[in-house]
Amino acid sequence: MHVSIGPVAIEMLRNGWGAERVVAAINKALDGVPRDRVRLHVCWGNYEGPHGEDVPLREIFPILKTARVGGFVLPFANPRHAHEYRVLERSPLAADQTIVAGVVAQLVRRPVHERQRASGNPI
């Protein structure tokens, strides 16, 4: 599910409303489907732009974890979100959940997050 958002919707996501509603819809659609058969792709959109207003994963991941899925495909190979794997240290997955490794199949023009620049590893 991909949702196009603007400034008002970003505030709604920051307050949890958007993520909770999306996860509730996903869970309803998955009723009866075994959790181990489902992966949830979470991203901030595939568009040319700075992605400077992307909602931090730490703000929505506790809600995303309530999705009845066996795994998450997250944008850790994306320079804008590469540092966010640390969210998993503070909010670990359930024992029966996993992170699905992905690859970048395109060139992107996105700013490197300041944590990546500070680490000296701009990816």
Image: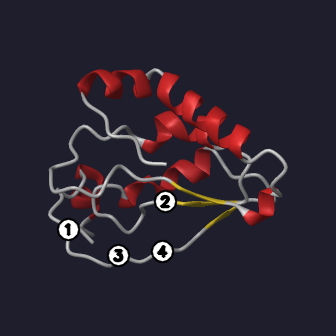
Query: In the rendered structure, which disc, 2 or 4, sits on the residue that comes first in sequence?
Result: 2
Q: Position of residue 107 (x, y in %)?
A: 20, 74
Q: Are marks 3 and 1 in contact (CB under 8 Å)?
A: yes
Tell me which residue sits at (51%, 36%) in the image.
60
- Residue 20 visible: yes
Q: Dot 2, crowdedness within 10 Å: few (<14), some or many (≥20)?
A: many
Spatial CA span between label 4 and label 1? 15 Å
Q: Are marks 4 and 3 in contact (CB under 8 Å)?
A: yes
Q: Position of residue 118 (x, y in %)?
A: 24, 57
* Among the 4 quarters of the image, the one containing residue 26: top right
Tell me which residue sits at (42%, 28%) in the image.
13
For the residue pair 1 and 9, the one nearer the viewer reads as: 1
For the residue pair 32 and 100, the one nearer the viewer reads as: 32
Q: Dot 1, crowdedness within 10 Å: few (<14), some or many (≥20)?
A: some
- Residue 66 visible: no
Q: For mark 3, what is the residue? A: 104
Q: Which type of secondary structure does the marked residue at label 2 adopt?
A: loop
Left or right, 40 with reference to 92: left
The number of numbered badges drawn on the structure is 4
Q: For mark 4, what is the residue? A: 102
Q: For mark 2, what is the residue? A: 74
Query: In the rendered structure, which disc, 4 or 1, sits on the residue that comes first in sequence?
Result: 4
The kind of residue tagged 3 is Val
The kind of residue tagged 2 is Leu
The kind of residue tagged 1 is Val
* Among the 4 quarters of the image, the one containing residue 120: bottom left
The kind of residue tagged 4 is Gly
Spatial CA span between label 4 and label 3? 7 Å
Query: In the rendered structure, which disc, 2 or 3, sits on the residue that comes first in sequence?
Result: 2
Q: Which type of secondary structure does the marked residue at label 1 adopt?
A: loop
Q: Which type of secondary structure does the marked residue at label 3 adopt?
A: loop
Q: Position of residue 19 (x, y in %)?
A: 52, 33
